[in-house]
Image: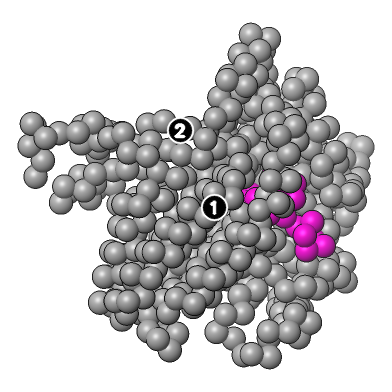
Amino acid sequence: MTTTSTRTPADGLSATAARHLLLNMTPNGSLGQDGENLFVVRRGEGPYLEDADGRRHIDGLSGLYCCQLGYSYAPEFAEAAERQLRELCFSPLWSSSAHPTAIELAERLARIAPEGVEATFFSGGGAEAVETAWKIARRYHALRGEPGRTKAISRRGAYHGLTIGALSLTDDPGLREPYGPGAIDTSFVSNTNRFRLSPAYADDEVYSAHLLAELEAAVLAEGPETIAMLIAEPVQNRGGCITPPEGYWPGLRALADRYGFLLVADEVITAFGRLGEWFGGDLYGSRPDIITVAKGITAGYAPMGATMVGDRVVEVINQPGAVLNHGYTFAGHPLSAAIALRSLEIMERDRILENVRGHQDHLATRMNALADLSIVGDVRGAGFFYALELVGDLDGGGFSDRARADLVAGLIPRRLREAGLLARVYNRAAPLVQIAPPLISDRQLLDRIADILAETLAEASARL
Ligand SMILES: Cc1ncc(COP(=O)(O)O)c(C=O)c1O
C-alpha cells in the first residue's frame, strides 16, 4: 500500500486512471491493485521516453510500431500542424468534396507505392483500413458480376485489428469469441513460421511449395468462386516477426490470379521504412491488389489509416455510376494529412530508409548471436523488426508453468524495464521478446538494445 508521503507522480496518475480511464487490452478492474502502477509516459526525446517519475527508457517498440522518427521532430511537425490549422482545420472527403492536403498526400503516396498502385482511401487507423479493403474487395467482385465472393482467407495467428469486421480476419479465439460469429466468413491457413517444422522446410522452395499447396487446397475446399480476398502481412507481427520464404509472395499472386480473389498486403506495421523499404512487401515481390497502412504513415504524430488500391481494382470500382458507399467522417483529416506529408518529407530528406538499410545487417548479426543463449529457440525478423522465440528447456521444449511465471512473466520483463528498454514480451503459447526500434536509431543504440537483451536473456538462461 502506498502512503501519501511516498506518493510519486505515477502513483497519482495511476489512481486517477484506474477510476476514469478505460485502457485498451487491459484488465482495467485490476489496475492499482497490489500496488501495481500504470506505466505512465510523460515525454519523449530522440528514441527515448521518460516516464511520469522521470525515468528514461529506450523506446524499443517505437510506441507500438508507430514512431518511425522517434520523438525529436516536434518543432517541424508543430509548424506543419499550425500552418494547416490556420488554413483549414477540417473538411471531409465526402460526397464529391475534398481538400488540397489529402489530394496532395494521395498523390505523394502513389509516388512511393509499388507500381500500379495509385489511389488511396483514407481512414482513422489500421482496423478501418482493413475493413475498407474488405468492402472494396466486395464491391470489386459485385461490380464484376460475382457477388457470391463473400469469404476471406487469413493466416493463423494473424492480427488485423479489433473492430468487428477486422476482428473476423484476426486469428485469436480469445479476442473473437466474446463477440459471437465473425462478420466475415474467414478461413485460416498456415503462416510462414517454420520454427519447429521438419528440417526439409529449411529449403525456401520446398517450404513455399508446401504453403502454397495448402492454400490452394483451402481455396478449392471453400469454392474458388466464393473467395473475395486473402489478407497477409509481408512479415507477420503476431507470432513474432514471421518472414516469408522466397517465392511465397509471387506464389500468392499466382494463386490470386488463377482463382480470381484479391491479394491484400496488410502493411500497417511493415510500411514506411520498418523493413528498410517504403513498403515491406517490396522486399518479397508482393505485388498486391490492395495495401493497408496506418501507424508509421504519420510517424505517430497524428492518427491515420489508408487503403491503397491497385489500378486494376480502381478501374472496376470507379466505373461510371458506381458509388463507393463507404466512409468515415474524419477520413483524411487535414491535420493528419499535413502531418503525414511532413513525415514523408522528413523521411526522405533525412534518409531514414537509408539509415535502416545501413544498420540492418549489424542488427541482424547482433540478434542472431542471441540464438546461442539456451532460452532463445529462434530469431526472426528483418529491417528494424525482430523477435526472439523463447524455449523453456535445454532441448528447445515448452515452458513449465513455474518457469513461465518466473521467467516469461517475471524476470525477463522486469529486468528489461530495470535496464531501461521498452520491448514487447509476449507470454503466449510461444513466448516471445520483440523489438521494433525507431528508424532513426544509430549503431550505438542498436548495440545497447542488443546488450540489454543479451544480459537479460543470459540471466534467464542460467535459471532454466
Ligand atoms: C498488421 C495490423 N493490421 C491492423 C492493425 C490494426 O490497427 P489499429 O490498431 O490502428 O486499428 C494492426 C495493429 O496493431 C496490425 O498490426
Location of the C terminus by quadrant is: bottom left
Residue sitting at 55 percent across and 24 percent down? Answer: 74
* Discs 2, 1 touching: Cβ within 8 Å: no
Is residue 329 rendered magenta in the image? no
Number of other residues with Cα within 10 Å of mark 1, as a class: few under 14, some 14 to 19, many 20 or more = many
Secondary structure of residue under mark 2: strand
Residue sitting at 66 percent across and 15 percent down? Answer: 84
The front one of 57 and 188 is 57
Q: Which image quarter: residue 184?
A: bottom right
Q: Provide residue 299's location: percent of width, then percent of height.
A: 61, 37
The front one of 277 and 32 is 277
Q: Give the prevailing secondary structure in the magenta stretch.
A: loop
Q: Which residue is mark 1?
A: 446
The front one of 181 and 212 is 212
Secondary structure of residue under mark 1: helix
Q: Provide residue 93's location: percent of width, then percent of height.
A: 72, 26
Separation of residues labelled 2 and 1 (CA atoms)? 18 Å
Q: Is residue 322 visible?
A: no
What amino acid type is highlighted by mark number 2?
Answer: Gly
Q: Provide residue 7's location: percent of width, then percent of height.
A: 15, 33
CB at disc 2 and ligand 1 closer than 8 Å: no
Location of the N terminus by quadrant is: top left
Tell me if 422 is positioned left or right of 93 in this view.
left
Q: Earlier in the sequence, mark 2 or mark 1?
A: 2
What amino acid type is highlighted by mark number 1?
Answer: Leu
Find the magenta span and give its range. 267-286
Q: Which residue is mark 2?
A: 44
Tell me if 415 is positioned left or right of 222 in this view.
left
Residue sitting at 21 percent across and 48 percent down? Answer: 36
